[in-house]
């Protein structure tokens, strides 16, 4: 999935974006099903509800943390790297 995300954003092309997103959206259900299957086979049935709830809360709490972390990274690493004034 990371390979797809890396390669379809290399060039600004609607066709490339459409193909990459189609492949990505086809893979997401497979990956999620594999994750659920592994958890269901490893965790005892009477504890699965708590484990699924905990896993979902961790996934949901990671979203704002990554949003706050990517801001300074973009500001100090990526934006100066792409800025045209850096090449003068």
Image: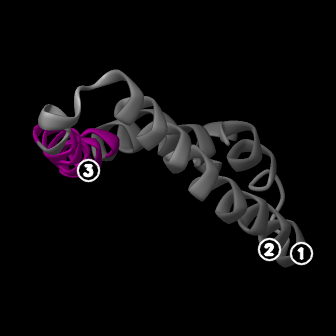
In front of the other: 42 or 74:
42
Question: What span is colored magenta in the figure?
Answer: 50-70
Q: Could you tell me residue 37's position as x and y percent?
A: 47, 38
Vertical order, 40 against 61 (above or below) = above
Label 3 neighbour load within 10 Å: few <14, some 14-19, many 20+: few
Find residue 18 and report its image quarter. Answer: bottom right
Callout 2: SS: helix
Q: Where in the figure is residue 7, as x and y percent of width and height?
A: 80, 46
Which residue is labeled 1 in the image? Answer: 15
Q: Nearer the viewer, residue 33 or 43?
A: 43
Residue 50 falls in image quadrant: top left
User: Between residues 39 and 85, which one lies in front from this camera angle?
Assistant: 39
Q: Picture quarter containing residue 74?
A: top left
Q: Which residue is mark 2?
A: 18
Residue 58 pos. (x, y %): 18, 39
What x and y, as percent, mark residue 30? Answer: 63, 50
Asked if residue 65 is among those painted magenta in the image, a careful observer would answer yes
Is the stretch drawn in magenta largely helix, strand or loop? helix
In primary-sequence order, the first of circles 3 and 2 is: 2
Tell me the residue that label 3 is attached to. Answer: 63
Distance between the alpha carbons at the discs numbered 2 and 1: 5 Å
The Cα–Cα distance between marks 3 and 2, rounded to whole angstroms, is: 25 Å
Relative to residue 49, is residue 18 drawn left or right? right
Q: Is residue 2 left or right of residue 10?
A: left
């Amino acid at each position: 999935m990371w390979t797809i995300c890396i390669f379809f954003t290399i060039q600004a092309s609607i066709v490339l974006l459409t193909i990459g997103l189609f492949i990505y959206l086809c893979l997401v259900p497979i990956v999620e099903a594999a994750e659920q299957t592994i958890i269901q086979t490893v965790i005892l049935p009477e504890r699965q509800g708590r484990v699924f709830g905990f896993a979902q809360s961790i996934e949901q709490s990671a979203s704002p943390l990554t949003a706050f972390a990517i801001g300074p990274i973009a500001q100090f690493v990526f934006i100066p790297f792409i800025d045209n004034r850096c090449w003068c």
